[in-house]
Amino acid sequence: MAPPITRSSSRNLPSGYQSSIDQPLQEFRPSECTNTLDEIKNMLNGIKVQTELFVVSLLIGQIKDWRLDTIKKEQENLFRHEKLSDTMDDMTLSVVKSEQYTRRDVVTVVGLPLADGPESQTDLSTKVAQALSQSGEDVKPADFSACHRNSRNNRTVRGKTVPPSVTVKFNVISKKDNVLRKYKNYDSVQGRGRDVKIYQSLSEHYAGVRKDILNFFNSDSDSTEYGISNRGLKVKWVTYQSPTAGFAIKLQSGEYFKGVHVWRQFVDKLCESVPSCRPN
């Protein structure tokens, strides 16, 4: 084996003293550092894994926060949309009520026959006054501020001749109210509807709602056209009462409800009165 490597110094040293630089150098053995290097490597790998886990956890947390924030915003937007829809419904209802209010002194007479010859304004007013007096209220042509036919010719409906309706505007609202309250479109003595009927004059909106309600009851009980089933129910009458009460509906089976101004209200009140009409 080769002698150990030594370093000497040119300086004079005390007898028996040997400088550390003259001592033999230890031989470097890489195998002795293997365990330490492996530990450092494992430590670095552990730090890397922990760092990755931290980043992933951070991202997951941010995603959760983002999802919660998104859900919150969606709920807020839905709430705003519902409030806006309710506001629009209230505004629409206010407009249609105001429009109907301008007709509070007007009635529509249906079924009054046309004259054989030319029909003067005086003749028409006299015939209308006579028909409305059957309510028990004394009605004269002087009670009208306007009275006119809504068409010139008869029309045919289901094989029957139907004369044009008549619009009548009263001078005094209370007079009109008394006539509507007392006049019965259904003749209980003869057990049938009268030939001449009287209705509150309706705006386009309310006329459409009334038509939809009648069409609903006349539709097939299994029809899904209206989103609910009529379950074979039959309507006895649909009457507009006032700007506050709106339509009042009476079914032949006895159910009665009012306060209907729009179709949604009709559906809600019908399903409340007849739970079987609710969609499955």
Image (spheres, rainbow, N blue to C red):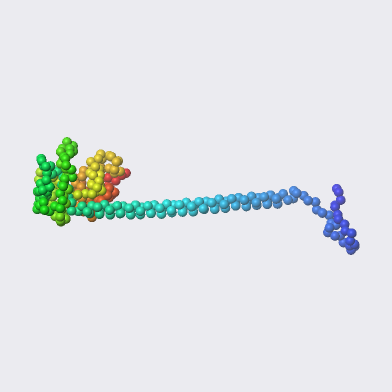
For the question of whether residue 264 can be seen, the reply is: yes
Q: Is residue 276 left or right of residue 192?
A: right
| 245 left or right, relative to 17 | left
In the picture provided, is 52 more to the left or to the right than 170? right
User: Residue 50, position in %: x, y?
Assistant: 60, 52
Residue at the image position 12 percent from the left and 47 percent from the top? 121
Q: Nearest the camera: 77 or 256?
A: 77
At 14% from the left and 55% from the top, the residue drawn is: 175
Q: Quadrant of the C terminus?
A: top left
x, y percent for residue 66:
48, 52
Residue 168: x and y in percent read 16, 50
What x and y, as percent, mark residue 108?
17, 48
Res 272 seen here: no
> Which residue is rendered at x = 27% and y = 48% of the image?
263
* Quarter occupied by residue 226: top left
**Residue found at the far bottom of this picture:** 14
**As rendered, which of 6 and 75 lies closer to the eye?**
75
Please tell me which residue lies in front, 16 or 255. Answer: 255
